[in-house]
Amino acid sequence: MAAAPLLRCGGRRARLPGWETLYSRWCLITSHNLYSSVYDPNEKTFEKLLIANRGEIACRVIKTCKKMGIKTVAIHSDVDANAVHVKMADEAVCVGPAPTSKSYLNMDAIMEVIRKTRAQAVHPGYGFLSENKEFARRLASEGVTFIGPDTHAIQAMGDKIESKLLAKNAKVNTIPGFDGVVKDADEAVRIAREIGYPVMIKASAGGGGKGMRIAWDDEETREGFRFSSQEAASSFGDDRLLIEKFIDNPRHIEIQVLADKHGNALWLNERECSIQRRNQKVVEEAPSTFLDPETRRAMGEQAVALAKAVKYSSAGTVEFLVDSSKNFYFLEMNTRLQVEHPVTECITGLDLVQEMIRVAKGYPLRHKQADIPINGWAVECRVYAEDPYKSFGLPSIGKLSQYQEPLHVPSVRVDSGIQQGSDISIYYDPMISKLITYGSNRAEALKRMEEALDNYVIRGVAHNISLLREVIVHPRFVQGDISTKFLPEVYPDGFKGHELTDLERRQLLATAASLYVAEQLRSQRFLGTPRIPIAKSKRRSWELSVHLGDEIYPVAVSKHGSSFSVEVDGMKLNVTSEWNLASPLLSVTIDGTQRTIQRISRNASGETSIQFLGTVYKLQILTKVAAELSKYMPEKAAEDTSSILRSPMPGTVVAVSVKPGDTVSEGQEICVIEAMKMQNSMIAAKTGKVKAVHCKAGDTVGEEDLLVELE
Amino acid sequence: MICCTDGCACTLENCLGGDDIRSLDCGYTAARALAVCAVYSPHVLAHSLLTGSRFRIEEKRRAALLGGGQARIDAQHKRGKLTARERILLLLDPDSFDEYDMFVEHRCTDFGMDSSKNKYPGDSVVTGRGRINGRLAYVFSQDFTVFGGSLSGAHAQKICKIMDQAAMVGAPVIGLNDSGGARIQEGVESLAGYADIFLRNVLCSGVIPQISLIMGPCAGGAVYSPALTDFTFMVKDTSYLFITGPDVVKSVTNEDVTQEQLGGAKTHTTVSGVAHRAFENDIDALLNLREFFNYLPLSNRDPAPVCECHDPSDRLVPELDTIVPSESAKAYDMLDIIHSIVDEREFFEIMPMYARNIVVGFARMNGRTVGIVGNQPKVASGCLDINSSVKGARFVRFCDAFNIPLITFVDVPGFLPGTAQEYGGIIRHGAKLLFAFAEATVPKITVITRKAYGGAYDVMSSKHLRGDVNYAWPTAEVAVMGAKGAVQIIFRGKEANAEEEYVEKFANPFPAAVRGFVDDIIQPSSTRTRICHDLDILASKSQSSPWKKHANIPL
């Protein structure tokens, strides 16, 4: 094993532990055999590779480098100094402050690190500089290998219109449409009528679904033209527009390709990524339930044809939209490693990062198309630090006070770049991890995913486990009846969490009541021999009142050995568990049904929140006597102090990050106050618009001075 | 159930069978009532008055259970408050309350107070003993429905009786305060009663834990009993503590102030520091008090209690290795460290809203109660000032008095400078914390997480003050002051690389470690394991100070 990395830390060199455990986590993954590309130790490769990225993808690349015996260099921003990828790498260098434009996108600083560390190659991961042809060009000019395709391919595929033209020439199915400069609204209408409604209008240079508008008639086309041409000019400085056939109810299915510098190219089957919110993928799987072998082959062959047409090398992804009649249309090609690449690795056994490095070094592919299997089924859930109850996910930030990946569940792979204690900050993508499960068939993979989601412990930030779990057990998803509109169709009024059936509600109430009694019983157990003997309670039954939602349920609990018999809603349930009250995960068996629940919080007043079937429920449990008396307790109006920010101490304002009219999100930094040579970050207590700012940088403020008001 | 008012032959059994009595009866079971009856019965045996006497006992008992009567009970409920007996019912284990002095009545004869309608069996306080999670506690609960809970001679006498017994037995006293003040009709008798209680508060101090829960008004002289006890908790919106009410304030100082502003829970938990914590309502307060009680030993003769613990004592806490920011001026939350180290992240914080630059409270390590003191870098950089010194000192002395080991987390840049502090007597008040740590003989474990500067380093349970085990994290900086200030004095700002040199020399744990002022430099993730192990060893610690009548802490 390589030596532990040395890090600069507060002006001293300190050896930090932690990555050994991470290393073993990786070993666990490989032992699960979720990808298994053979490594040939005699094949010469790079000595040192720099990863121009952060988070899980940086960790993912480092894992393969370690396997291949390549030394790694991590780059990081100053807030990432203790990040997992920094600890895992052999060397780590800070490239700038937190904002990505000053660190992970700072080409000058990164080039400087490459020179200093003498890295021979750079893996860009995804996002950041991964599809930046200027970066690739600068690397090439200094003789450093870019792990990815040539600048030519990046450029060709990065342009919507050029890529579509190339695709057409390579006989790849494209969506009927027009691309180029549209003179005026009338011309736009004429083009739209030619294609046939509905049509989609957007700026050619805009990526993904950004600025995309759908028009169903002439009127909407004129409006779409106006917005898109304005945006094209202002955001991209490029007037060209794309007007094309809009595919209603489409599925997003993409083909992974892998090509070398010797003209060989393979298609590694498809990934279905139809479950999306706001054009961002949430759940992905491979293979797709929808494709038959013929369609798969046709799509694969067209993808390979396109790759060859641009002399593509490295791993890439050709995205298609597939309509309900299995017609497929080329969408775009991503010239990088995709976020969702693990599902392909699971079913093909290839280590895509390893193959990318080999190809970049100039080796020919080791596989023939016939060697590429579909073994079993893999599903990936993107676990985000976000609140799924707000527009299917609004970012949440904070410290991961407790974090435990469900690696004890069989055939689970977790790609993450964070650990317990990590901060999820406003500066970067709020993805916590990619949770991948594998099975010999889809049902098995989904069953494991359910178990893995229940066993995933994430505390300190909001997370989307509840949404993910609801999606993977939804009958439509289970049947494979999905499209990119799945979420808005299934949850037209927004996601509200799991809806309990009567039986599930009783199970939850019985579990919560049993936990309460177990806790009460434990609080009477003192060790040692007290001077004044403890009066042992002979109580065997409890009458409780449990508040859940808007209802109050009478619950009777009686103890029989280590199990509880619970009567709720006229039904008797038997609840058994080890009742380990310190463990974040609790396995409970209710009348023979095993459930993994998480008690998120509790307090002396009987309030508790329990994660059950993925969703967190708030309950209050009181004895019957206390519940009866609670009717006398006064109702309290909630005091709202969240809209004003006062200085908690006397000090100097170092920086103010907002101005009136700005929208701030909860937890966002509003200003920084220095007191006693210490900088204190003042954060917004709620999301809202800034009404007034009462301080400026350099001001001296006293305790309780009003700093900022929100509306 | 109001029956038997005609003095008829209604039997005891009948009376006790009523549901109304059961619901009000704080564990006063029918069986015990019968036994009491049997004790009285020989005096009237074979007498036609037998049934009459039984009847009178029961009538009194029933009257006592009703306090000031249903109308006043309803009024109490309308104020959002529970009655004295309902409070006891929630505080104690079911069926565990043994009541004393239910038949005591006030002895005032002036102002028509001797008329039968002005007599209430038990008077304006309910007293007795019971169990909280099986452990013995003495309780008094003032009854606002009887003369507004005012303190008569008899009322005081009842409280003194249970305090005396609690001290003898060695069990805590819990007072549930809800009283309008002195019983004016009784004059000096009432004042004497207060003084009797004060004296016992003082004599019991450091012998048995004394806890006050303010659940209504508590004004005038009455406030000094809670002030003398170890902990004062309040109920938000329904409890007040002040020397004189708003009317008197207006007439004397011409200030307009509401009861809530003058002496409400918010005032006393954030501004004055009189109260240690506030709870939402009566039920919330009583349930929290039950949980709090489990942290305390019953008396100074008992060791800190050890509860069954499911959290492994050898649990590593990896996030601690990166919790201290590399920039020494950047803040972090000491509560994050505390929560992650203690059992099950449970921390009962004392005075969480007052002098927030120091954190104190109770937690458990491998099941054993510990007192935790920590500088809070997040608030005023964690400096020591007047309020935080006094807050810390009182907590440390409580732990020392009751055999609760102390764990101190140090990140302190020094004492807060300035005229406000100097004029306020920071020297005198800072000395209290120094005094408290120095005199404490309970196991003392100290962890320096970052800064330990100047005199504040000495104060925070340093090795020099008989710290048993003192650890430093690799991020520790033990020095006289921060680099910038030190360099200005040493080099008068003339040396170019002076600051770097100073940081290299002093801003690390080595200067302290090579002198043995810290016992080890430890990996932060191992802190829980180390402390749990140390506590096991130190459980048998024995240390004493020279004989003295009492020490003279700089008050």
Image: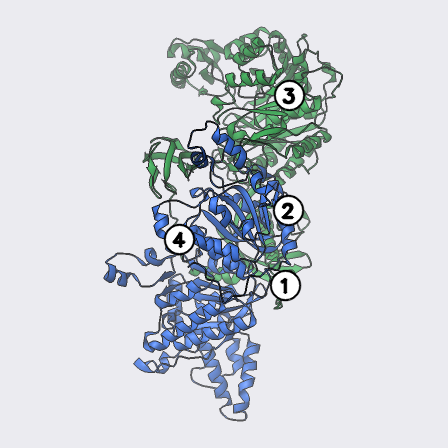
Q: Which amino acid does label 2 sit on?
A: Thr
Callout 2 touching callout 3 (CB < 8 Å)? no
Q: Which amino acid does label 1 sit on?
A: Arg
- Residue A543, x across and y down, in percent: 57, 61
* Mark 1 or 4, nearer chain start: 1
Same-chain status of marks 2 and 3: no
User: Which secondary structure lies at badge 3?
Assistant: strand
- In the image, residue A96 sits, relative to residue B438, either above or below, namely above
- In the image, residue A640 sits, relative to residue B68, either above or below, namely above
Q: Colour of chain B?
A: blue
B552 sits to left or right of A250: left
Quadrant of the snapshot with the C terminus of chain A: top left
User: Which secondary structure lies at badge 2?
Assistant: helix
**How many other residues sit within 10 Å of disc 2, few (<14), some (14-19) or many (≥20)?**
some
Q: Colour of chain A?
A: green
- How far is disc 2 from disc 3 in space, using C-alphas? 49 Å
Find disc 3 in the rendering and name its residue. A270
